[in-house]
Image (tube, rainbow, N blue to C red):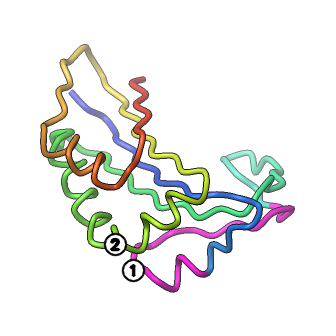
């Protein structure tokens, strides 16, 4: 069914200091600063950061149900709602879910997941590949 699930929560902005957020929460986020040069992918493509950003990502390469996967992650993130909501309201925030599937499958998100996303004040982008 599912061959991989990727979740990304990104907060970014030119006047955003991702170090401030990283100090305040215990999620393993990555920090990038504007004009910093990184090399990404297998071919190590050169990438210049366009803005400051903090990225929390989680990858699951298993058959875990999509609702279980999302619920586990959202319950970790919601613990920091009071801290995150200030950053989410001030800066550009993206919440992306990417699902790689081997065959056709119906995906239904539970009411609890939709409720938690709403509580965080996030818009979700879902890609199914």
Q: Is residue 40 above or below residue 15?
A: above
Q: Position of residue 21 (x, y in %)?
A: 54, 76
Tell whether 46 sits left or right of 9. Answer: right
Q: Which residue is mark 1?
A: 26
Left/right placement of residue 80 relative to residue 45 reads left
Does dot 2 land on a helix, a strand or a loop?
A: loop
Whichever of callouts 1 and 2 sits on the residue coming sooner in the sequence is 1
Determine whether 19 is above or below 102 in the image: below
| Front position in the image: 125 or 90 | 90
Q: Residues within 10 Å of mark 1 (few under 14, many from 20)?
A: few
Query: Which residue is tagged 2?
Result: 80
Q: Is residue 96 magenta?
A: no
- Residue interval drawn in magenta: 20-37
Residue at 54% from the left image edge and 55% from the top image edge: 10
Question: Are the residues tagged 1 and 2 within 8 Å (C-beta)?
Answer: yes
Whether residue 67 sits left or right of residue 126 in the image: it is left
Q: Circle 1 — which element? A: loop
Residue for point 42% across, 23% down:
129
State whether residue 109 is above or below residue 45. above
**Would you call the spot at circle 2 few (<14 residues within 10 Å), some (14-19), or many (20 or more)?**
some
Between marks 1 and 2 in the image, the one whose residue lies nearer the viewer? 2
Q: Residue, x 52% and y 65% (percent of image)?
A: 87
């Amino acid at each position: 069914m599912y061959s991989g699930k990727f979740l990304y929560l990104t907060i970014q902005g030119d006047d955003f200091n991702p170090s401030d957020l990283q100090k305040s929460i215990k999620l393993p986020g990555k920090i990038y600063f504007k004009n910093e040069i990184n090399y990404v992918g297998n071919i190590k493509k050169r990438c210049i950061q366009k803005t400051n950003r903090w990225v929390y990502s989680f990858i699951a390469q298993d058959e875990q149900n999509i609702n279980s996967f999302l619920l586990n992650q959202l319950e970790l993130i919601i613990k920091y709602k009071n801290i995150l909501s200030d950053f989410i309201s001030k800066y550009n925030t993206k919440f992306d879910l990417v699902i790689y599937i081997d065959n056709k499958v119906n995906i239904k998100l539970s009411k609890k997941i939709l409720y938690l996303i709403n509580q965080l004040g996030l818009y979700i982008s879902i890609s199914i590949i």
